[in-house]
Image: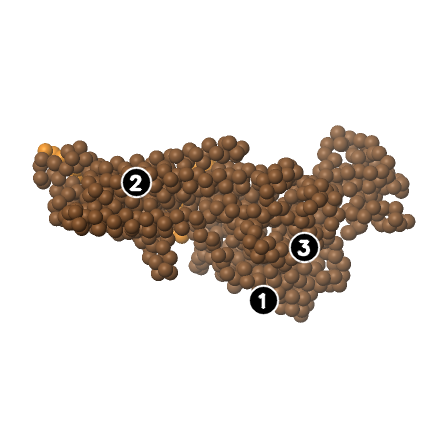
Amino acid sequence: MSALFVLIGISIVVAGSFLAAFLWSVNKGQFEDDYTPSVRMLFDDELKEAAATETPIKK
Amino acid sequence: MSERFAYLDDTPTVNKLVQFSSGTQTNVTFSLPQMHCSSCVFLLENLHRIEPGVTKSQVNFQRKEVFIIFNPITISLRKVVELLAFIGYEPDISLKDSTQKKAVTYNKKQIYHIGIAGFCFANIMMLSFPEYFSSGNIEQAGLKATFTWLNLFLSLPVLLFSASSIFISAWKGLRQKFLNIDAPIALAIIVTFSRSYYEIITGHGAGYLDSGTGIVFFMLVGRWFQNKTYDSFAFDRDYKSYFPLGVTVIQNNTEKNIPVTQLKKDDRIIIRNGEMIPADAMLLTGNASVDYSFVSGESSPIQKYMGELIYAGGKQCGAAIELQIINEVSQSYITQLWNNDIFKHKKNKEQSFIHPWSRYFTLALFSVAIITAIYWSIADTSKLLPAVTAVLIVACPCSLLLSATFTYGNMLRIFGKHKLFLKNAAVIESMAKADTLIFDKTGTLTQNHASALQYNGTPLSKKELATVQALTRQSAHPLSKIITDNLGNVNDGQLLTVNGFKEFAGKGIEAVVNDMPVKIGSAAFVDELYNTDNYESGSQIHVQFNKVHMGAFTISNQYRSGIKQAVTELQQKGYELHLLSGDNDTEKNTLTKLFGKDADIRFNQSPQNKLDTVQQLQSLHKNVLMFGDGLNDAGALMQSNTGIAVSDSTTQFSPACDAIIDGSKVGLAPRFLAYARAGKKIVAASFILSIIYNFVGLSFAVQGTLAPIVAAILMPASSISIVLLVTLLSSLVAKKIGLK
């Protein structure tokens, strides 16, 4: 039965990491605009490289 | 174009617009209402290729905004704006941007609350399963303690973080001596959690933490669902959103740009093509052709001559004009409206009918709790506390509230699909209450940019019509445009040469088309022997071929499709209809036919008249709903119980209102109103269902036999079934009414 304790611990950790991922993505603004990124990914690759060299924007 | 954005060279103006500025980097966000497709995103995100001074541009399509970082050393803000205007996306820069920073509508905190509540709720639910299945007798003592203590820790973030908004709202209500719907919910949460903590700490039982966290989670989701509104719409615009930021003044023979707020009486200003006249002024030089479509919805420009007074709010079409200010911006004819008290105080929002219901509910709940307490204090004191707390836990009004939030949330979406965009869910209730409807004419009942063209006179052949079109095509005058558009494809491939084109402002146009002199314009222009008796009044455009008068085109307003039916339907349903038009009574006959003889139709209404009429109706205890469009309706829309702004393109400006409707959907008004009324019934019906659930739960609770498993099943089952029921019902009713 003591295996249960370990399993419960693991399940909480796994679920907690999903929660952390969700909170992180909200904080990064991934849900702010759910249309533009889907269009942006279709643009040519060279633009992405150009954009990648810029410093990330802090609002 | 060259001088239009000159005010952006003014440093104080620039500082108001930019969000951040250092020596080599400036950040600014513009609203670009023209944005409409993925190509727009591509073009706007590649600004740095067109203009190296731009470091980065990032589009938020849903908000129709672009965030731009540029280097102020290589490029000025004015140049950036000019570049955007040049590629076809003129930023929407207005006085309001500088007076008030836009509030971020996206509420991250709410999402965090929901995320954490959901996580804790699901885990507590899972950890409670063993307890349910073993009916409280888990053999290993250590395991049971682990489960319950884990639950306790998991519930803490929900109580302390996620539920905070509910507590705050309840507390605010109590401080104003008002029992809002959050108060009983806050009470239920406190009782549930404290009893559960007591049971766990003393080792008596497992508590009701699964139900308690569930309540919080469902409540938060319901609220989010209902409050999800439209990011790209603004419902609180006043004249400041329409007016420009800067204006060119002439001081000591030099041009200077100043912010419009600093304009004083007797200042001399220059207004160029496409610019707005910011204050009442007198025309000094130039020919003014003023388009008042912002103000009245009427798009044909009005000619003004030297020395005439020009009211603020119009846009100059044509060459630059010089004006002398007569009234300051805030004292002008159209802006005066905003000095009215209704714009200073926010509309007193009527309380939703849910609130009184929740008050009855709370009272009933307390009565049951007290009766239970009295009963058990006599019969068996050991059961007193468990029974009373169980009553308070199980009878949470959350299913009551959920039914309203989900019904209205779903209805908002269905209205949105039919291009009626409501500011919030409370508007549904105020629409359902309306019994008196007011319509504006121009731009509301009539279409702004479509006009019917009628020709009277010597019949014109196809070739002759093509000749007319060849001439009107040369002119940018709105009336010429209407003729060009209406004639369509009369010219099938013939080559017509147009020589010696001349445009006489305010009169007409002439040219030699295929060796034939043609004149088109006002009666006085076309016919030198002009005699008013020969012609009808109204806006007529006369045609003359080879010095022979052929006939005249009449442009009349075109009513939106479905208006006639809508009006009849509304009258049948017992709504009281009024029509308030700012125009003269040329359309009186058509409108009387439309509204019937007895209808209240008023012409020549000033913005103040319209506002007064609304107030007058309200003093007769009418519940007024108004459809209007231009700035001249702004006061009346604000005063109405429900103000609905009509807009031909939802990107266009619209005055402060409770809802925005797409012009083509005005004909659906009877259905929208019927649906709003039906929505209220759906909420009432689901209330009854939730009360039945509460009775079931209470019957366990008063006996002091509410097992955690019963609470844990009843609570989500009632919530989920109510959410499903109201969503389904509101969609079904929409289909039945004809709003798929």
User: Against B108, is A38 above or below?
Assistant: above
Circle nearer the viewer, 1 or 3? 3
Q: Distance between the residues labelled 2 and 1?
A: 66 Å
Circle nearer the viewer, 2 or 1? 2
Q: Which chain is orange?
A: A
Q: Name the residue under label 3.
A: B605
Q: Mark 2 lies on which chain?
A: B
Residue B160: percent from left, percent from top: 26, 52
Q: Mark 1 lies on which chain?
A: B
Foreground of the two, B332 or B735: B735
Residue at left offset 41%, top offset 37%: B726
Foreground of the two, B36 or B164: B164
Residue B164: percent from left, percent from top: 31, 52
Q: The brown chain is which one?
A: B
Kind of residue indicated by mark 2: Phe
Residue at left offset 71%, top offset 41%: B593
Q: Is residue B735 left or right of residue B561?
A: left
